[in-house]
Structures are given as C-alpha cells and as structure tokens.
Image (spheres, coloured by chain):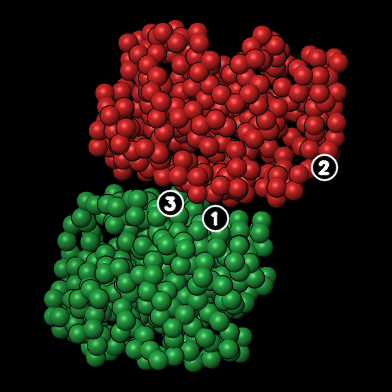
Chain colours: A red, B green
Amino acid sequence: MDSNFEEKKVLITGGLGFIGSNLAIRLAKLGAKITLVDSLIPTYGGNLFNIDPIKDRVRINISDVRDPHSFKYLISGQDYLFNLAGQTSHVDSMENPETDLAINTLAQLQILEACRHYNPDVRIVFASTRQVYGRPLSIPVNEDHPLAPVDLNGVHKLAAEQYHQLFNNIYGIRSVILRLTNTYGPRMRVVDARQTFLGIWIRRVLEGKPILIFGDGEQIRDYNYIDDVVDALLLAANADLCCGEVLNLGSNEAFSLTETANVFKKLVPEGEIEYVPFPQNRLVIDIGDYRADYSRIKARLGWEPKINFEEGLSRTLAYYRENQNKYWESS
Amino acid sequence: MDSNFEEKKVLITGGLGFIGSNLAIRLAKLGAKITLVDSLIPTYGGNLFNIDPIKDRVRINISDVRDPHSFKYLISGQDYLFNLAGQTSHVDSMENPETDLAINTLAQLQILEACRHYNPDVRIVFASTRQVYGRPLSIPVNEDHPLAPVDLNGVHKLAAEQYHQLFNNIYGIRSVILRLTNTYGPRMRVVDARQTFLGIWIRRVLEGKPILIFGDGEQIRDYNYIDDVVDALLLAANADLCCGEVLNLGSNEAFSLTETANVFKKLVPEGEIEYVPFPQNRLVIDIGDYRADYSRIKARLGWEPKINFEEGLSRTLAYYRENQNKYWESS
C-alpha cells in the first residue's frame, strides 16, 4: 500500500481540517506530492496549525470548493483526489440549508464535472457519513440499510455519494465512497458542539468542566480513531474492485454515551458528568442508536480498526493537553 | 373528495405543464380558486393553450421556481400546493447538471423554506418519479426498493423527496410524495423525445412517420393516463394518514416497447415501427425494465387506475388530431 503514493500527486479538499491534515501527514511520510485545498471557514475545522509538522512539505491553496474555476486548475495533473471538504454540522444544515446544499452537493457536482473535463484519470475517495441512513431500523447498520436521512446534511451528503457513483459508472471517473461514523483524534475541532460531541467533551474535560450528556445516556455510538480512518482512505484510493461502491467504516466496540463518558473519567479521574435534556433542535434530527457493520470493507480491503477507544482517547487527550492554545478558539 | 376543494385556494407549480394543466381543469370544476405558477421555459412543457378551457377562471403567474422571492408572496394564504414544477428530461439532466440541481433540488428547498416561514399550514403534494429507484433489481418495484438513481435527474428528485419528508417530520409541513411512472394524455409535450418516448411516438404516428423503438423492443414499461394521475393527486392532498410518506403510482397493465407500439398500430393502422440502436447518451442512463407495484396507495387511499392504455391512448390521439397546431412546436 505505502509505495503506491511515492512521488504521486495528491489533492486533498478540506486539507487543513481534522481528517485532511492527518491524512496529509501520513502521505508526506509516504513521499506524496501534496496539495491541500481549504477555505478556512472559521467554524468548519480547518486550522493551519494542523499541518505544522509538514508545513514545508505541502502546497497550501486557500480556496473554497464552491469556486468551480479554481478547481479546474487545481485538479489538473493530480493522481489522487481525497475529497473530504464538507459542512459537517447537522444542526447548521438545518439553520443554513442553502449553504449546506452549496458545499455538500453543488460543489461536489462541480468537482466531479471538473474531473470529467480536466482529469478523468484521477482516482477519488469521497468521505461520506453514516448520516445518510437516518434512524437505524436495527443495529449494526450495513450498506444495504434503507437511506432515509433525518436532516439536510444527510440528504446533501447522500446526493454527493450518488454523484460519485454516477460519475464512476457513466464516465469512468474512479471513486470509492466511505461512510464514516464518529471519527476522533488529534487535530479535530474542539471549539464547540457544532460537529461532534466528542470534541467538546475533550475540551470540557481538559478545562475541568463537566461533560454534558444529552438525554439519558443510553444512546449507542461507535468511534474510529483518526489513524484507522487514514488507513481506510489510503486503502480505498487504490481499491480497483471497489470503484463506484460504498463502504462503511466502523468499530468492533460500541458504547452508550454514559459508557463513553466513563472512559473519559477513567483517563481524567477528576472529570465530571452531567445529564441535561436533549436540546430541541437536536432532538428533532436525532438518529437514535447507531453502530456500523463494517464487514464489507473488512472483506474487500482487509481494513479493520486497530486502536481501541481508550487508547485513542488517551492519545487525543495528550495531544490537546500539549496544544490546547491552538485549538480552544476558532482558527 | 370533490367537495374538499370548493372555494379552496390552490397553488400549482408547473401549472401550465402537462399534469398541472389537467389538474387545474379538474380543480376548476370542483370550485377551487387556482393560481398557476409556470416559467414557460420553452422546452419544458408549459403551454398557455393547455388551460384554454379555464383561462378565465384561473390566475396565471409567470415565474420561475428558482426565484425564491416571488414564491414567498405566492404561497401565502394558499390551502394546497401541488408542487409539480420540474426539469423532467433525464438526458438534459446529464447535459446541464447544475440547471437540473437548481430546479429539482435547490428550488424545492426554497419552496419548502417559504412554506415554513410564510404558510406552515399549507398541504403539499409533491410529484416525484420512479427514476429515484434506478435500475430495478426486480419488478414490480415497491416503495421499499433500494434508491440508487442512475442519472442526475433521479439524484435531484430523490433529494427533493427527502426535503418534503424532512419538512413534514421536523416542521409539520404536511406533504405527500407520489412517485409517478410514465404519464400520458392530452396536453403532454410531444415536440421531441426529451421527456418521454410516448409524446414523440404520438406526434410521429400522427405525422405519418415511423415510431422509433430504441433497442430490441423487449423493455417493459407501465403507463398512467393523466386523469388517473389527477385522481391520485387530489386524493393525496387530503390524505392525513399519509403525510411524510411516499406512494408509487402504477398500472395493472405493463407492456414491452414492441407491445406498446402495437397498441399504437391498432389505433392508427397505417402507423409503422422501426427499430433503431439505443443512442449512447440514453443507454448509459437507461433503467432497463420497470413496472411499479402500486399496492400501497391502493390500500391506503383506494386509488387505482381506471383507464386502460388502449382507451387512454385513443383519447390522447384524438386530442392531438384536433389540436396538433398548438403542440407541434415548443410554446
């Protein structure tokens, strides 16, 4: 796997964000020639400090995926496109629906049209989300589960998945789609509760504030440590037999929110937990319990997560203890 | 059913088009106060002659559903919204993807946002399409069939369906979604093969030109006569127990393309049939055989089609024999 990227030209949208920056750091070790595209929209997670370890080895292009003209130039000559840019907040998608549509759907169509016209040989990995399933009918959820998103973010990401499949099937633009679950680790956005509760829990526990659990704490979630997700992205980029397909990521562990908070307490014994009512704007789009069935990607690509939650969370807390001044405020 | 619409204010998007105009003519008989919104985009099917029988009894508002500002005013005070406007050509959706997205997805989001802010009590019926299923895994296709559209039109209509469901479930904007199959009848666009092969077959057979069948003629299709579709729209508009749901329309008959052409020949004995290769731009987005399972709407609303294909086609041919000068060219 590793040698595939040596001297290869790689474009990462959302490249200064959580997943994009960790991927870039790995790809830099593998000898890739990396261009990072990021708009640095303050609340979205892009952060120049994220790529501090490789800042002299990558090209940074500050631009927005909603700008189709710059993308035509940027995509030309690239061997790989890791298409990670997105608006990821479910609540924000309900408050600013047209923005979510523009970034998560329209821009994706324009990116694929640019690939078709200017670089049809590029290989694409698209980062989607378990949100496309909506409320699971049962767990674990495999890729054949009905697609019934319960918020606009899910609708828009699903359309973008289908774009990638269509462009693969009709125009031969090779794409593999990964449906991510809760990803966590160093370089995630921890400013507030916009994107993921794990981020704000990390921040609060390190600030000596109680972790806030919405509801009764019984809700089930699964978590992937960032390094495992980077493994999956790299494997998918060369998965010839998976082009046009959708693959779930997931974990062999699942936790209720209370159990999740207890892992935090184990690592930060002075941490406190507080149960609060589900905010109404989250309750109406809540998906209930979720756990992915990731047996398809395991069978097809041999991927499985290697870092358990306690270990991953321990590494993550260590990172933010050291670098919190770079992450407590929006970049 | 009929008395529900007396003196009720009804807005129809795509109101000068095929389905919208037939619906308006029926609603006028039922005593509704009707506003028709249509952009009269030349190739889309809107035609002022379509509403000739009721032209003094309806209000016509020429505007585009992509204009969110006019819609805020238009939706205010309406009791019902029949949301029929759309770009319906599958081939056009591949050639002009952003236009299809703007009309079939973005405009729908704006319409629903306008309903939420300016008329949350309106009742909506949304006309969707069997295209959201993609290539059927088996026929007949019921509403639980996987959603895997094979063209951009299908992706965009699916997103719009999901918008209607979300706004129903989250904001209580009552919507029922109908998935239409091939609808035919008086007032359909017959200028060319853009939207439906039945339209251009009607025109060609009346012009003494051969009907062109793409491929071997074995492909299966089902057809609904417009009056049956109007019945379904009216039933759905007051279907309290179906809000947020999706219901297939369909037929108790299904035909191969060759069988379909033979019905034409029975009605127009001098008609000729010619088999031609599938054009490449259609082949790549073709869905293969399709036939709907409409048992859900039959069980829930008692709807079933009443006009068989031979009878419906006979009425349709009679209409175009009489009015062809109004339909041979784009309006």
Mark 3 touches mark 1? (CB < 8 Å): no
Image-quadrant location for residue B121: bottom right
User: Is residue B250 shown above or below A257?
Assistant: below
Identity of the residue drawn at 68% across and 37% down: A290
B34 vs B196, nearest the viewer: B34
Instruction: Please check whether the numbered discs 3 and 1 fall on a single chain.
Output: yes
- Kindly state the secondary structure of the residue where label 1 is placed: helix
- Kindly state the secondary structure of the residue where label 3 is placed: helix
Q: In which quadrant is the C terminus of chain B drawn?
A: bottom left
> Which of the labelled discs sits on residue B162, or is there none?
1
The residue that disc 2 covers is A277
Q: Residues within 10 Å of mark 3 (few under 14, many from 20)?
A: many
User: Is residue A96 shown above or below A87?
Assistant: below
- What's the residue type where badge 2 is placed? Pro
* Relative side of B125 to A193, left or right: left
Identity of the residue drawn at 39% across and 33% down: A175
- What's the residue type where badge 1 is placed? Gln
Image-quadrant location for residue B197: bottom left
Identity of the residue drawn at 29% across and 33% down: A72
Identity of the residue drawn at 61% across and 62% down: B116
- What's the residue type where badge 3 is placed? Val
The residue that disc 3 covers is B155
